[in-house]
Image: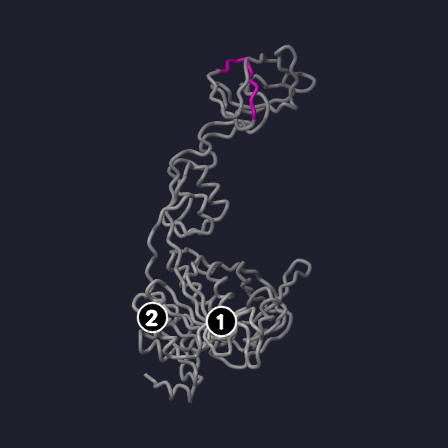
Amino acid sequence: MIKLEKLRKIGFSKLTPLEDALKKLFSHIHLNPIEEIEINSALNRILANDIICEIDIPPFDRSAMDGYAILAEDSFGASPKNPKSIKLIGITEIGESSTLKLNKGEGIRISTGAPTPKGADAVIKIEDTEIENNIINLYISLPPGKNISKQGEDIKIGTQVLDKGTELKAEHIALLTSLGFKNLEVRANTTVSIFSSGDELLEPGNTLLPGKIYNSNTPMISALVNLYGGEVIRGETVKDDKNVIKNRLVEAAEDSQIIIFTGGTSVGTKDYLPEVITESGIVLTHGVAQRPGAPVLIGLLSDTLIFCLPGTPVAAYVSFLKIAGLAIRNMMGCSILDPRSETIAEISRDVPVSGLGYIHYLRVIVEKSKNKFIAIPLKLKGSGVISSLTKSDGIVEIPPFKEGLRKGEKVIVKLFPR
C-alpha cells in the first residue's frame, strides 16, 4: 500500500475505472430486511415481493356506459327510421347486486360500472334511445358485447402485476388498492449518516468570516439521500481533526448502513479520511477515473459502507449520483438503480476533453428545437461552481477514451433526479 505521505506527494498514481469500483462495491452489499407497512405509506417504497393478482379485475361483467342492458339481437336492424322496441323491467345501479334476469324483448336501466344483469349481452347508450310508458325505443343496432367490460378484462386472476424491486408510485398504489391490498411488504429504507469535514465550513445563520464558506454539502447530500430512498439519521459538520473524524466514524457505524463524508478525501495535509479509514476499516477503492470526482474513496467498517466524496459541491453531487446513490438503492433491492430519466439530444457545439482515461461529466441545458432536443454545453470543468447545477438540466457522460463530442452528435442526457 502506498504510504499516505507518498500519496500526498504524487497524487493518485492509479485511478480505478468506475465500472470496476462499482463491481467491488456491490459485492459487499446485502439486502435490507423486509418490513410490512400500510399501503397509504407506500409511496416511493421498494416492493419486496412479486405481486400476483388473486381476483379478476373487473371482478364481474359491468356496464361501460349509462344506458340500458339488452339482448343484442333485440336491436338488430334498428335505426332512427326503424326503431326496435323493448320493455323496461327494472334498474341496476352501481354498487348493487341485482337479481333481475333479462329475457328477449326486455331491457334494464343500468349505470356505468354496475354489474351486467343475467341474460344481457350488450348495453345501449341513453342517447341512442327514447323511453315512454316503460317502452324503450332503440335507434341503433349493437353487436353482442358492445359497451360491456368483461370480467378479468383488465387483469386476470393469477397474473403477476408488479415485480419485486418496483419503486411504488401513485399508479402502483391505485392498482394494489384495487386488488384489495391494505398492507404491503417492502424493503426497509437504507439508514445514512452524513458528515461534511473542513475547518473552513460554517453553518448557515452564522456571520460569514474571512476564509470561511457556508456548508452546502450536508443539506445537498441529505436531499439526494431522501430522493434515492434513504433515511438520514444524522447530518453534521466536523473539523479537520483526525481524532474527531475517527470518533464520528466509529459512532455512526453503530447505527448506519452507509456513512457519507464530503471533503477530506484527497491528498492535502488535512485530508485525514484515507488514513482514518485505513486504520479503522478497509479501503475498497481510492481514486475513481472520473472528472469531476476523482478523489472518491469507498471503504468498509464492519458491515457499514463508507463513501468519502470530494468537498467541491459539483464533484460531490455527481459522485453521489454515480456511486453512493446506487448503493442506497441496491441495498433496498431496487430493480432500477439509477432513477434518472434520459433524453436524446444533439450537442450544440464541439466539446473537447483535456485528458483520456476518465469519464467526463458535462453539464448541459436541454432546449427543444422544432422536432428535436438540443444539448447546450454549460460546464465541463469547475467542480466548485454550484450555479452550473442550478442552471443546467442534466449531464452528458463522455466515455473515458473518447476525445470529445462533435457538434450535431447525438448524446444521452441524464436529467437531474427530481
Give me the disc on residue 250: 2
For the residues marked 1 and 2, what is the alpha-carbon distance in whole angstroms? 22 Å
Q: Position of residue 327 (x, y in %)?
A: 40, 63
Q: For this view, does 104 lie left or right of residue 303?
A: right
Residue count near mark 2 (Cα–Cα under 10 Å), binned few <14, some 14–19, many ≥20: some
**Residue 103 within the segment the image draws in magenta:** yes
Q: For this view, does 9 lie left or right of residue 304?
A: right
- Residue type for callout 2: Val
Which span is picked out in magenta?
101-111
Q: Is residue 181 above or below residue 119?
A: below
Front-most of 161 and 251?
251
Q: Secondary structure at mark 1?
A: helix
Q: Position of residue 399 (x, y in %)?
A: 49, 72
In front: mark 1 or mark 2? 2
Number of marks present in the image shown: 2
Residue at the location (47% across, 21% down)?
A: 97
Position of the C terminus by quadrant = bottom right
Q: Position of residue 79 (x, y in %)?
A: 66, 20
Dots 1, 2 in contact, CB < 8 A: no
- Residue type for callout 1: Ala
* Marks 1 and 2, the one that precedes in the sequence: 2
Q: Is residue 22 above or below residue 105?
A: below
Front-most of 380 and 206?
206
Q: Is residue 44 above or below residue 158?
A: below
Residue count near mark 1 (Cα–Cα under 10 Å), binned few <14, some 14–19, many ≥20: many
